[in-house]
Structures are given as C-alpha cells and as structure tokens.
Image (cartoon, grey):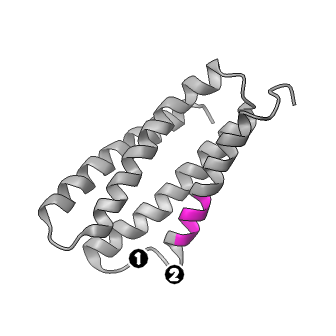
Amino acid sequence: MSDRFFVFVGGLFGFWGVAAAAAAAHIAGTGMLATAASILLVHAVLLVALPAALNAWVAHRGLMRIGGWLLAAGVLLFTGDLTLRALVDDGLFPMAAPAGGILVMLGWAAIGTSGLVSSRL
C-alpha cells in the first residue's frame, strides 16, 4: 500500500481529534475524550509527516513503515475505545485501550530504532 495512506489516516485522525476536543470542551465529564483528542492530534501530525521522512531520511524505511502501521492501528484502538467509553459508556471490546497503547509504544520504538539500523539491510 502507498505511503500516501499514512497521510490519509493522519488526516482522519486530525479531523477526529479536533471533533473530540470540541466535544470534550462542551460535554461535562469527558476527560477520556480530551485524552483521546490529544493522542489523535499528536499522532495525526506524525502520520502526515511520515512519508516525507521515509523519502528523505537515511533511516531503515521498512522498520519505519512497520512503526507507522503499528501507530495507526494502536491509536485507532486506544482512542476508539476511549471515545466510545466517553460518549456511550461502552468500549470497543475488553482490553482494547491497553492493546492499542501497547501497539502505539511498539510503533514509537520501531520508528526510533529505524534511525539506528542501517538503511542497507
């Protein structure tokens, strides 16, 4: 799949993040929604910038792509679960948020490690 997909997902995360932040500002007791908004917005920027880094950087591109996919999946699970819990008091499935959080951490680790691994591998 094209690296442009990261830009698409980043744009969706940005849209969702702004909507979640606006909802959190107007709905009482939505701390989880505010947390989801913050995570969505931070990772939206990363995913939109990832293709530029893949094309310009000397990092290991395969590892960086894996990190991007892990981040996208993890953010979707984590923030999806938080958003549903905040708005309808029911999550995606048991342990969705922790599983998503672990995927996000692994994604960041993969992206960080990609800078240490030779791009010739």
Q: Position of residue 90 (x, y in %)?
A: 36, 80
Q: Quadrant of residue 114?
A: top right
Q: Is residue 18 magenta?
A: no
Look at 72% across and 31% down and name the residue there: 61
Residue farthest along the front direction in this orientation? 116
Residue 70, above or below 55: below
Measured Cα–Cα span from mark 2 to mark 1: 7 Å
Q: Looking at this view, is 92 or 106 the one in front? A: 106
Magenta stretch: give its range. Answer: 98-103
Using the image, determine if residue 84 lies above or below residue 69: below
In depth, the one of 20 and 93 nearer the eye is: 20
- Mark 1: which secondary structure? loop
As for residue 99 lying within the magenta part, the answer is yes
* Residue 23, percent from left and from top: 19, 59
Residue receiving disc 2 = 94
Horizontal placement of 33 versus 26: left or right? right
Q: Is residue 109 above or below residue 86?
A: above
The kind of residue on which mark 2 rests is Pro
**Location of residue 13 in the rendering, given as x and y in whole percent from the top left corner:** 39, 47
Tag of residue 91: 1
